[in-house]
Image (cartoon, rainbow, N blue to C red):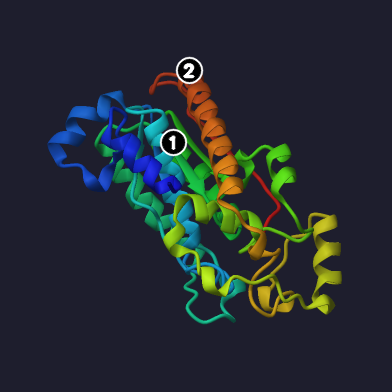
Amino acid sequence: MTGSDEIRQSADEDRPPLILSELSWPEVAEIKDGVEMVLIPFGSTEQHGPNLALSADAAIAESLCRMASVAMSPRLLVAPAVPWGVSPHHMNFPGTITLAADTLLRLFDDMVSSLTEHGFKRYLIVNAHGGNREISGVIAQELGNRYEIEFFGTVFVWDLVPEEVNTKFQKTSRVGHACELEVSDALFLRPEIVKRDALDAADFREDGWDLRDTLKRYGVRAAHSMSDITNNGALGDATLATVEAGRARMEAAVESLSDVVATVTRSTPPSNAPRAQVASEHTDN
């Protein structure tokens, strides 16, 4: 049984997820006062080597949010996923779509202003694309201060996975994109996007890694291209991916996300008090 099958089975029993796009307006009106937080899945439409469909980041983010909504039903409402992100560094690979930062800020602004008008007061962007980290933080600060809401945060999916879990399943040294870890997540959550017959390890360009490693060592952020370091667009070794690893990572991520939501819910002030924003940081691809 895959992760998506388990989620659907659980939803069919007594813990249904709250998925905004699947509800009618009377159903939204009925449940909105009990919703503690709106999760906004944030991904990308970009190359993931030969290993995953272009939708991988958005699919993983949306499926993880659905899984969390099941686990915490009926406290979390999952907004429609934002399927495009900041991906100029993948544009040398056909199919990638990248949006400008101001486009994404306006998109999130419109989403949040609409949902806030309907009475929702806490938001968390659940981001599965490393290239979205900076804009996610800007969005959290901008919109968290612009609207009379109680909380606006953003978290990177990989930050939700404890280091010991990653260490157990990471088999190569250069991971973070279409690697054994991300492909494992997809095998568990969304197996249909995994290109099983084409799975391959990274085809590295070693001449590009000296600059990348030096900049990363000192925390220097700079424009770059994935094609400078990998010929096939992948890192790590996707042939080592397993459903077991994906299950362990995503179950740990849901547990961490549940802790975040519970802490925010009991810690945020009433809506007429000073607002809170938070953004997580992570040095990934």
The residue shown at (50%, 25%) is 264
Q: Quadrant of residue 13?
A: top left
> Which residue is painted at 72% across and 40% down in the image?
163
Assess disc 2: are there few (<14), some (14-19) or many (≥20) residues with their C-alpha within 10 Å of its C-alpha. Answer: few
Q: Position of residue 116 (x, y in %)?
A: 31, 37
Q: Quadrant of residue 28?
A: top left
> Disc 1 marks which residue?
68
Residue 203 as seen in the image, left or right of residue 135: right
Q: Nearer the viewer, residue 64 or 25?
A: 64
Q: In this view, does 173 lie above or below 268?
A: below
* Residue 79 visible at all: yes
> Which three-letter amino acid code belongs to the residue tagged 2?
Arg
Looking at this view, is 76 or 272 the one in front?
76
Frontmost of labels 2 and 1 is 1
In the image, 85 versus 175, the foreground residue is 175
Amino acid type, label 1: Ala
Q: Label 1's element?
A: helix
The residue positioned 45% from the left and 22% from the top of the image is: 265
Neighbourhood count class around disc 1 (C-alpha, 10 Å): few under 14, some 14–19, many 20 upward:
many
Decide: is 50 above or below 279: below
Give the x, y percent position of residue 276.
Answer: 51, 30
For marks 2 and 1 on the same chain, the one whose residue lies earlier in the sequence: 1
Mark 2 falls on what kind of element?
A: helix
Cα distance between the residues tagged 2 and 1: 18 Å
Q: Indicate the quadrant where residue 75 lies.
A: top left
Write down the residue under mark 2. Answer: 266
Tell me the quarter of the image containing the C terminus: bottom right
**Mark 2 vs 1: CB contact within 8 A:** no
Q: Where is residue 179 in the image (x, y as percent from the top left)?
A: 65, 61
The residue lying toward the viewer, choosing from 29 and 254, is 254
